[in-house]
Amino acid sequence: MNSISFEIILLVSLLIYAAEARHLVKESEETGNKWAVLVAGSVSWQNYRHQADVCHAYQILKKGGLKDENIIVFMYDDIAFAEENSRPGIIINKPYGPDVYYGVPKDYTGEQATADNLLAIILGNRSALTGGSGKVIESGQNDTIFIYYADHGAPGFVSMPSGNYLYATDLINTLKKKYEAKAYKSMVFYLEACESGSMFDGLLPNNWNIYAITSTNPDESGYAFYCDIEEYGTCLGDVFSISWMEDSDKNDMSQETLQQQYEVVKRRTGFDTPLDLRSHVMQYGDISLGNQLLYTYIGTNPPNTNRTFTNRKLSVAKKIRAVNQRDAKLVFLRCKLENVHEGFQQKIEAERQLNNEIYHRQYMDSTINLIATSLFGQKNKSHLLEYVRPAGQPLVDDWDCLKLFVKIYEEKCGTLTTYGKKYTRAMANMCNVGINEEQMIMASTEACSNEFSTSKIHGVHE
């Protein structure tokens, strides 16, 4: 072979190498990074399930290949070492299940787990953070984002462990800013909460490359699950959450699409449960993203590689009771009272806590009814309390009005408990028909200053 031929071969080889290198770089840029935010919005042992859900989600993402630096976790972190935990340092998400707490990043815990921090993290705005690990979503235009939230909700907002509620309008405005900044390629949002559909219905457009699934439609409760384990005395998971996570545990996520998982979760949550324990799993935003593979957002599960997806039935075990999220605390306290076998004082305290919860529920029923009667009269109040806007319309036209009315109620009547949060729909309806601030103050003051002592209900945080 002469020197000219060798030089030609060498030149061709270098050109091929350079082309392949450019292809690999381009492919890497197009693939981008996977980011995830996991949020448990509650506190205390009675809400064990939310932190358990989020810890389980972390294990799925970690096994799927996501790096800790790209997974951001919000949780109060008061469950693993709670005095009620007979297995200190261990959290499970199903009966006799594996520990899901091990290795979970403690990014934003306790008083750092706020709505303001969450919104700052989504935007990648480190300067707006208060405490915590400092991790934010530093995503680019080729990156994907997965957000999962589990906790109590209400028409128009979801709770956070500390600080203010996360209102739908603030979440949507944050997502809009993220979209306008071209700071992601596509995003998936899984939301577990009562009335969770109200966070997106009529609010999330279909052209932001965001696909959202909620555990319920805008006007129904969600359900806690794995609630009959005596050792724990509390529910270990939520129906919607365990449905998508147990499906992810069993399937090859490089073969299953978001739409296929939606169908599995929809059936398990809405059809494979008793009639009185069902909710309607909903889709919002860019539904076409449902054709994408789960792997795109949450990685894959190596042991399940090459396992063919089958749209199988994941039935709910009849012996393991599901509980309405609004009633979970009541069930927890009744179970606590029943399981106190020794100690007169402990029995008295457990009974006091149960009676307090029953009182709180009666109190909120009464005060909201009095406010509605004051504003609309006995004849028309039922319509105000029960009216639900048609699908595709947001809960309220003036979100500042809703925020104000919630604030007024809580100042005059006490903090909204998990049970009482359902009444924010009535407050939204008040805004929609033109009730003003002065009228709401007068009605709330009158309803909450006479028959009931607000001292028993102020400061409740669930």
Image (cartoon, grey):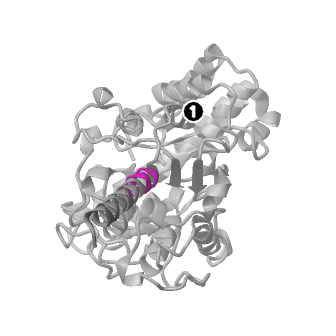
Q: In which image quadrant can residue 232 be found?
A: bottom left
x, y percent for residue 412: 49, 25
Residue for point 67% across, 56% down = 288
Position of residue 214 in the picture relative to residue 112 (left or right): right
| Residue on which the image places disc 1 | 169
Tell me the amino acid under the disc marked 1: Thr
User: Is residue 105 among what the camera can see?
Assistant: yes
> Magenta span has 450?
no
Residue 101: image location, x then y, percent:
25, 65
**Where is residue 38 drawn, in percent x and y?**
38, 53
Count up the numbered dots: 1
Q: Residue furthest right?
A: 379
For the record, the magenta segment spans: 24-30
Given residues 296 and 163, the one toward you in this image is 296
* Relative side of 353 to 285, left or right: left
Q: Is residue 210 left or right of residue 335?
A: right
Viewer-proximal residue among 43 and 342: 43
Task: Please say whether residue 151 is visible from this viewpoint.
Answer: no
Which residue is rendered at x = 36% and y = 42% of the image? 137
Q: Is residue 407 above or below residue 68?
A: above
